Each structure stands twice: as C-alpha cells, then as structure tokens.
Image (tube, rainbow, N blue to C red):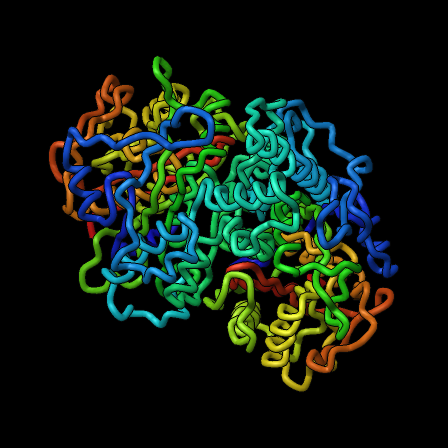
Amino acid sequence: MSAARVYVRAAGAVAAAGTGIPSLLRAVGDPDWQPVLGLTRPDAPPLPVAVCREFTTKDIVPPLLARRLDRPSRLLAVAAREALRAAGDPLPWAIERVGVTAGTWNAGTSALVEVLRAVFLTSPDEAPPAQFPSTVANAPASQLGILDKLGGPNITFAEKQVGGLRAVAEAARMLLARRADAVAACGVDEGDWLNAEGYARLGALASPGRAGMVLGEGAGVLVLARDPGSGPLAALAGWGSASAPAPPHRYPAEPQALVAACAQALARAGMAATEVDLVVSVANGIPALATLELAAMDTVFGGHRPAAVGVADRLGEGAAGGALRAVIAALTVAGAVLPAWDCPPHLAAAGYRTVACRPRTALVGGVAGGGSAVALVFTAA
Amino acid sequence: MSEVWITGIGLVTALGPDRETTWRRLVAGESGIGTVTLFDTTGFRTRIAAQVDDARIALPALDGPALRHASRASRFALAAAAEALADAGLASGSGAPHPWALVLGGGTAGLFEAEAFVARRLAGGSRVRGLTELVDVPQDAPSDRLGLAFGLTGPRITVTTACSSSTIAVGLAAEMVGDGETPVALAGGADALCRLTYAGFNSLHAVDREPAKPYDSRRRGLSLGEGAAVLVVEDAAHARGRGAHPYARVLGYGATNDAFHMTQPEPSGAAWERTLRAALAEAGVDVADVDYVNGHGTATEQNDAAECAAYVRVFGERLAGVPVSSVKGALGHCLCAAGGIEAAVTALAIDRAVLPPTAGFAEADPACPIDPVAGTGRPGRVRVAVSSSFAFGGNSAALVLGSAG
C-alpha cells in the first residue's frame, strides 16, 4: 500500500456546540461542556438528539437563499463556507476542479415527511414541488455545489454512522485519482423525528435507566487537497475500510471489520500502531459497540495504550458526528485544541487514558449498523 | 491500473426477473410500463410506471437473516446479486467470507414499506406493524443485506447521488479493482417505487400520462420504474485465471457537477460535456472510436435537450452517425438503479453485438441529431460504448465500456 497522503487545508463545523470552529474548540477544550438534548416530535416526549440550537445562517448565506434551502443544506452550507473561506478567498483552485464528498445518515427525511404529509393527509396532487428535491440525500452536497459553483465530482455516501468518515476517505481517493484538485469532505445530519423515533423503537437510543445512543445534528467539513499549501492543518495519512456481515439495524458481533479498516489505514500511512498518540473513539453509548471497539483496539494496539477521547456521547452519533470526529482529530494534531473530554469508560478500564499532551497522530474509526467500518489516520503536517 | 472486466450480470426489471428475460424483451422492443398496482394512484396525474412483478423474483436460497424484514428494494438487490455471482461463476454456497468490495447506488430502500408507518404516525397513530416498516429505511440497507447474504467483508460503499448513483458506483468499483484494492467488486444499484417519488415527480409535472418517449419530439415526461442491477466487476487477470467470460471491459469513468439547479440541467450541456470528455480521456479513447451511446434519455423536455446538447458538443457533426438509445422507454426511470441497469445493458450490447432500442421513440427531434435506435434491437459490433447518466443536483456521470476481446 502506498504512503500517498493528502492534506487538510481547512475545516468548518456546525454542531450542538455552536456555529463555527471556535465554538467547537471551546466545547472540546471544556471538560464540563454538555449538549442540550431534546428533539421535539408530534404527540410524544422529546428524543435524545444533540441539536444545533444556536445555529444561524446570518452573515453567511443570504436570507433569500437560505429560505430556499432545507435544514441539512443550510447546516452544510454554513460549515462549508467556513472551511472554504479558510482555504482561501478566492479559492486557490479552479472551481470546476473542486469536488464535494458528503456522508449523511438522514438528510432528506424531514422533507420527505412533509411531502408525505400532503399526500396522506390532503391529496396526492397537493405534494409540494418545492420540497421534493430536498428529499434526495444528495441535496445538501448538491446545494453546496450550486451555492459555491463547485464543478468537480459531487458524491454523497449513505452509510449510517460512518457516512462522514467515508466521505473523507473517498475524498482522498478522488484526489489521488486526480478527479479533483481539492475536495470539501463533509458529513451532515439533521435532527429528524422519524429516524430518531425509528431507532428509539428499536431500543437503540439512550433513555432513563437505559444505555444507548444520543443522535447528533450538524455538519463537519474538511477541505482536502494533494498540495499541502503554505500551512496545512494536518495530513490525512491513511484510510481504510472493510465490512462484516450484519443486519442493517445491528452491529456486527465480531470486531474484524474495524480491525481491518484500522490496519489498512495504518498501513497506508506507513505507521505502526505504536505510533498512534490518540484514538477518537467510536463509543456512542451502545454497550455492544463498546465491547466491539475494545476488542478491536486490543487487536490493533496489542499492549500499546494511546490516549482516547469520546465524542459521540456529546456531539451525537451519525454521519455528521463522524465528520466532526475527523475535524476534531485534525485540529488536535494541528495543536489547535487539547481535548478535555473523558476517555470512554470501557477504554479507560483497559488502560487507555485521557489526553494529557498534544498528540501528533490520531486514529478515527467507525462502525455502522450493518457492519461497514471506516478508519482514518491524521498526522501533524 | 490493471484491466477491469465485467464478468457477471444480474438484472431485475419490469421486463423480467432476470438478465435473459429482460434482454430478450428489451431487444424485441417491448415495454414494461403499465398500470401501477403496488399502491393506489387515485389523485395522481399519472397511473403508470414500470413495476416489477414481485411474484416472479427468484430469491436465492439464502439463510434467514439476509431476507428477514427485507424491503422490496433489498429483495431486488439480492436477486440481482445472486444472478450476477452465479453468472460469473462466483456463486458461493459455502458461507465462507469473501474479501470483495460492494459498491451500490442506494435509493428509496425501505421507504415504500415505511410509508405505511409514516401514514399512521401522521394521522395520530403510533403502532409499528413489524420491523419491516423500519429496518430497511437507511439507504444502505440493501448493501448491508448483500453483505450479509454473500459474506462480503471488503469495503462496502453506498453512493446516493440520485439518478447517477449506480453509474458512479460502477465507476468507483472499477477504480478500486483497477487499483488493486480488491480483485472483485459487486457494483450496481437497486430502487423501488414508492408513493414519495411518485408524488414528487407528479408534483414537478415531470411525468407523462403515457409511456415515456425518450428523444422523441412528442416527449412529455418520464415514466417511473424500479428494479436492480448488479455487475461483477473483476480484475482481468483474476478472471482469466479462472476462465471467466468477459461481457465487456471497463475503460474509464467520469463525473462532474454542473452547479446549476437542483432539478434542471444546465441547458448548454457544457458540464455534461466535461463528464463525457473526462470519461473518454480516462478510457484513452477518441470520440471517433465510440460506436454506441446508451443515453440517460428520461424523456423530459429539458433533460433530453441538455443531454443532446452535450452530445452535440462532444461528437459534433459525427453525432448523426452515432447510434443512441435509452432503455427508459421500456424499463422506466429506475432512479438510483438506472445507471447500473444501463451499464449492464451496455455490456450486453457489446457482448452480443446488438444495440437495444428506445421503446416509444417514433418522431425524431430536430434538436437532437442522433442516430436513434428504434423499434427492435439493431445488430452492430460495438468496440467502445458510453453509458451516460444525469441526476438531481446536477450530478452527471459516464462510463466508457469496451470489448474485452
């Protein structure tokens, strides 16, 4: 496997922590920061979703334009604008050579509920034509392409929890195949009651007295390029993916897929597992996933015990959550933040520790229900 | 990059539950578009679509978990994948894991089944009637079920760029095989009719009350369809080593975004031209080498016009001599499965030296100066062919396939 790498030129974020990278960094650096949870839904109590309560498009997307976009498209537009402006204004690449890769778990769901509301409760011919284009999961990435006139390949990946990590890995593939000169690699999810309710009914969400997921809302964006430029944040040194057979709503019973994904990412980076300083944990509150992660880390690291940080329990699980984990990893190895959040308990019990000093390398892995796994390795540039 | 072949094809369409039935009826000029029976179409502008006959789908002898609570879309994908693997001589009954990649275009997945729950929930109810209404809702659920059914342990990727999803999936799979990441990849897509897409395209007035007439001057819109295609994309040396038959060679692919509008293509065809030229450049073939184009051909006024504009830009005056056809007049627009189905049909055209016709085509559009393949299949040797797709959000993608002989 080659040691070809690509560079993180800029980042953007919208999360439960607020709008923009500074808000995210303040939260990540605060050990006591907790999200406000609660997604309202019709006729039932709120669900545990880390929603973006302070999100605004003001000063970033013109009001008339923002009104035409659905919520996931607005979330991504704001995060991507932050990242693209940080990469250069004007961008240092021809815009028809700038691509977009996006991962999402649920973009389009709220729009499809609105279309179906008209169909079922009024009449089929009352289906709102303006809402229908937002029902496709690629709407946020496509709207980003339209807003910023980005003419490179524009590909959205639907892989539940690992969609955001997939988007970063496929951005690297796109760059190395020279299909684009730069790529905005994104993850985006909205808080939507239909999906959240579905997972609640499957018993996957946290509830009083029951361990489970907190879902997340937001967008994370990394601008990647082959050219490091004058001051890249970090290098994306390796990526890998594998899968294990499992039904769509269950995690695989065995850790092999995550192990294989991590091993590929490390091999591509030309790194030994002992060189990993930080693990941005997959832990999302589901006990089965914690068990799986611990087994995978034991196999990958042997006796090595890097620092580890949990993110999904605060920013929420999802494709956006995966992208935000990648953003945090890149910014951490860049020295922009020292994560103050806890090492997840299952890893702490096995000897992994909370971050104490600046890591130079970070491993970000993920596993989706159904068994797809993706891993990324970031190194200081 | 190593040479990449297509060595297995599985199809589920409105014309048939398998590859051979679909191909035979397609080249005979038949259409699978008819009255929708899957759900009540009262109140919609149209009543027709290319609906798959569920009763005829031969689901493979799989163990329980892959099929349990599976949606129609997942069942289409499972049937197509089983046929493709058997066709390639890679069928596995051993249960042993295969380190192959899977790249599928993901569309509505289990939405048809979930709509029943949504309807009750919106009306104030709350009961879920079985897990089938929930578990296949994620767009990658069909991918997960294929992984489970066939013991796939390689990268599992679900592309969702609307109507170009499975074109990109096949291109991405070929890239992974060509780069040596995996010797075999299953690629394609699956999509199923549902009330959401039916209502949505009706609301956009993008559907014709009569069966679609791609590239025809009388065209009034598309006909929706459903189905699945799975192609076995294989490293040529790996395939030669086991004596596999190649339908076609994957020479290259391209994708761009026109950054213009969510539902309307950029009318000059300039971005689509970039896609076609990128695919041809990667394939290392000249425009003059293209013997056949399997077009997007939705039969909407704007899409066909932009597509033809792109062909004019690429092929110039030679376009009048380039055979072009769209299978959407026969199979409907299968959305996220469309590109995979069309890639499969293009590979079959190369392998069998027969160009499939455009069902419904009768009157040429002066603005679209192609050589239309109409009526029934036209015999013709194809050394190089292009399969071209376009999607909501301005995503176009193209595959260049060639003879492996």
**Residue B42 in which image quadrant:** top right
Residue A276 image-quadrant placement: top left
Farthest-out residue, left: A357
Whether residue A159 is situated above or below residue B165 in the rendered picture: above
| Closest to the observer, A33 or B129 | B129
Q: Residue at x 26, y 34 (%)?
A: A279
Residue at horizontal 18 percent and vertical 38 percent from the top: A27
Q: Is residue A252 left or right of residue A366?
A: right
Q: Residue at x 42, y 36 (%)?
A: A161
Q: Is residue A374 left or right of B113 when viewed as pictured?
A: left
* Vertical order, A258 against B167 (above or below): above
- Taking depth in this image into account, of B45 and B106 the one nearest to the observer is B45
Q: Is residue A45 visible?
A: yes
Seen in the picture, residue A287 relative to B119 is either above or below; the reply is above
Whether residue A174 is visible, yes or no, is: no
Task: State the residue at coordinates (82%, 51%).
Answer: B34
**Residue sitting farthest toward the front:** A122
How many labels sit on residues?
A: 0
- Pinpoint residue B235: horizontal percent, then vertical percent: 59, 51
Question: Is residue A252 positioned above or below B360 on the image?
Answer: above
- Residue A205 % position (x, y): 41, 24
* Residue A316, image x, y percentages: 33, 33
Query: From the image, which quarter does the C terminus of chain B lie in?
Result: bottom right
Residue at the extreme bottom:
B317
Q: Is residue A158 left or right of residue B220?
A: left
Where does the image place residue B395, in percent across and percent down from the top left?
52, 62
B379 vs A363, left or right, is right
